[in-house]
Amino acid sequence: MNAVIAGFAERVRQAAAQKRPLRLKGGGSKDFYGGPLAGEILDTRAYAGIVSYDPTELVVTARAGTPLRELETLLAGQGQMLAFEPPHFGDGATVGGVVASGLSGPRRATSGSVRDFVLGVKLMDGRGEVLNFGGQVMKNVAGYDVSRLIAGSLGTLGLILEVSLKVLPRPAAELTLRLETPQVNALEWMNSWAGQPLPISATSWQDDLLTLRLSGARAAVAAAREHLGGELVADGPNFWQELREQRTGFFKTGSTLWPLWRLSLPSVTPPLPGSQLIEWGGSLRWVKSGEAKLAAETVSAGGHAALFRGSEEARSAGVFQALPPTLMSLHRKLKNAFDPAGIFNPGRLAQGL
Amino acid sequence: MDKPSDIAAAISALRAILPEQGLLVSEEETRPYECDGLTAYRQLPLMVALPETEDQVVAVLKLCQEMHLPVVARGAGTGLSGGATPVAEGLVLSLAKFMRILEIDPVARTARVQPGVRNLAISEAAARHGLYYAPDPSSQIACTIGGNVAENSGGVHCLKYGLTVHNVLRLKVALMDGEVVEIGGTALDAPGYDLLALMIGSEGMLGIVLEATVKLTPRPQLAQVVMASFSDVVAAGNAVASIIAAGIIPAGLEMMDKAATAAVEDFVHAGYDLSAAAILLAESDGTPEEVAEEIAAMRSLLEASGATDIRVSANEAERLRFWAGRKAAFPAVGRITPDYLCMDGTIPRRRVAEMLTRISEFSKTYGLRCANVFHAGDGNLHPLIMFDANVPGETERATAFGASILELSVEMGGTISGEHGVGIEKVNQMCVQFSSAELALFHAVKAAFDPRKLLNPGKAVPTPRRCSEYRLTGTPGTKT
Ligand SMILES: Cc1cc2nc3c(=O)[nH]c(=O)nc-3n(C[C@H](O)[C@H](O)[C@H](O)COP(=O)(O)OP(=O)(O)OC[C@H]3O[C@@H](n4cnc5c(N)ncnc54)[C@H](O)[C@@H]3O)c2cc1C
């Protein structure tokens, strides 16, 4: 066994024996996300590096501690990309953190989320066992799909050691358009466009400005531009980059970043009150207030609200919506299957997990 | 459940739950359920239940849980790995009556359907909105969405549009104890663990799908397919890699060898080049301009890879005919042999040519013919091993031939199943692909949902004992 992995296994076994929590951490760029942090830090960056990458296979395998930046640079060199556009939220983002947090960027509504691109994981469970699920091939139904289950589990099921991700070619052409329109129209348009064969790869609306990105074959992008109208945005790539990293004005105003609520909704949900930034064709809405009322409306519309950024105190009350009891009971049993001593990131995803 | 008095009690309790004619008990009635598409394995169940409402499903499950009666869910029975093969001491729970499309929302681009709805019926119902359900298994006329979810089924267009797991948004699931849970939703990225991913591909072992909400995709303006002939399979395999390397993700990228095209041509007259050692079908879809650009690019890549003949579908009728041949490949091979086994290994694309060479060697070793049909773009292989179960020894040879292919798939860095599931067919090869600790985790996941192991017992995940015997002797113990 690799010496670094052996070291991890030793710590995991000790922690399990003493029932001492471990806080799994890469670059710490997403420390703000999820429930409060607890436990002794286990830094994954000791286990870093690309394991394999063959562009014609459309798969890359990387160790968890690999900097996301390094991975993205490697892919860009071959004209490929992570199509779910994971946000970095800081300099230190690692590949393991991307998968554990399950956060996707602007392209998510059209290309899919982190989990849609996870092909396999190497995982250390709460007994210090190294387990492999999925693999490096496009299709794999042998055994339960544990690798996708790990995506977004916030490190509560195990220590991710390696991940294999599907990658895609960068689009041949890309451009950004802007139209001025109120929210109600923007929502209607985004939903209507999504039902047509248009190469829209990202959308965003704020303050009566609807911005969209077209990506694909040159001819398709040109035809769609003609069809959709609007003004060409000169610094398109920069706009989406800043949005993906939440560095645009909306996320900055005021002295602090929080509270920031993330409302995940059916895309057809009518406009909600309050100042908002909308992404993902209407299915992601950011709100900068702690209004509990909005959260309740989100739930009744069939969605879910999360306190994306907030004070330590607010976070300790739970940042994600509580799960119904039967689902919660399944979660507890699954947690117990992977991490019987309950040592990995306790409370980060939900109390009791 | 083997005491006659227990069985009699179960029957009368089930009759009280189910509609008239909703419980089949006699051998004559249960015979049609004795196997799925993997006809080499047959087993009569104790009985077959055909509930019509969700409440009846829940009541049946609760009763079975109480009486310790194993339950095997069944959709259309087209599965190719024995996932729906009955267990002798258990009940088959047919979802065949759940055939309603509950809602099509053209604006939200979703369809909410019952589990027994056929795959193709969803696309047909969505067609008037310019939408369709993207995963298109070749069995789509018959197979159900419940079965698709259980197997994480794919189709010839999955390279670009994803598998079932990428196209299902929400499930309503009844657990073995009768609890009903909703997982996922039309809002993206639900909180908590991704139980949707866990459920999809779980082969009916974690819960019974009562309802699914699936994503609908806009129909592309145009689709065209290029058919390229190759005089050797290695060149065809390399052509696949060169298309992907050029940054093209075709809407479909399929390969058939000579044995497969010959069988198909006799059956559906698709217009395939019978002199070719292998043909590739590569589809492009999108706007007319986009398709023209991509077809031209693929054409020159195929030429550079040594294609001996290239044809582009001239119209929609011809495109459908080219695909009809591919989609009829299994039944076409079924016509030329008494029995066949369909393999489903997936390997890295770059090793497709090497795999084909090895398969033809195996074919000589085992003395059995094999036709090859590949989802080449995904590296998912369907070698069809032909045999005659009535000839003593052939079934065993076919099984051994299949095992060799699957084990080689694992050795090449791939998997034993890309889309058909493990079922009973590949349960031994699970011991090759997974370690004891990994299998133990699968059992623990199963126990979280179904602690009494009543849902589809004996399938997909082998017991440690079975594996130790298989690893030791190459033959499993008789009892799993
Ligand atoms: C000619 C032919 C071509 C095929 N082509 C393809 C192909 O291109 N791609 C592909 O992926 N597959 C293909 N298949 C395999 C098969 O059609 C798929 O696996 C399909 O999804 C099975 O659906 P079904 O309704 O027939 O399920 P069944 O065979 O009835 O059952 C399959 C599994 O699903 C479970 N199940 C069924 N319904 C439910 C439910 N409601 N809840 C929980 N579990 C349930 C069963 O217990 C069983 O384990 C093909 C099969 C044939 C015969």
Image (spheres, coloured by chain):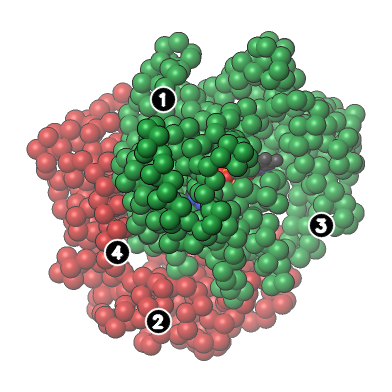
Chain colours: A red, B green
Task: Give the distance between the C-alpha atoms of the residues marked 3 and 4, in whole angstroms.
Answer: 51 Å
Q: Nearer the viewer, mark 3 or mark 4?
A: 4
Q: Is residue A99 left or right of residue B108?
A: left
| SS type, badge 1 | loop
Disc number for residue A324: 4
Disc number for residue B480: 1
Task: Give the distance between the C-alpha atoms of the residues marked 3 and 1, in whole angstroms.
Answer: 55 Å
* Quadrant holding the C terminus of chain B: top left
* Quadrant holding the N terminus of chain B: top left
Residue B59 position by quadrant: bottom left
Looking at numbered disc 3 in the image, what kind of residue is underneath it? Ala
- The answer for which chain carries disc 2 is A
The residue carrying mark 2 is: A276
Task: Give the distance between the C-alpha atoms of the residues marked 2 and 3, in whole angstroms.
Answer: 41 Å
Marks 1 and 4 close (CB-CB < 8 Å)? no
Same-subunit check for callouts 1 and 2: no
The residue carrying mark 3 is: B292
| SS type, badge 4 | loop
User: For ligand 1, which image quadrant applies?
Assistant: top right
Task: Give the distance between the C-alpha atoms of the residues marked 4 and 2, in whole angstroms.
Answer: 28 Å
Q: Nearer the viewer, mark 3 or mark 1?
A: 1
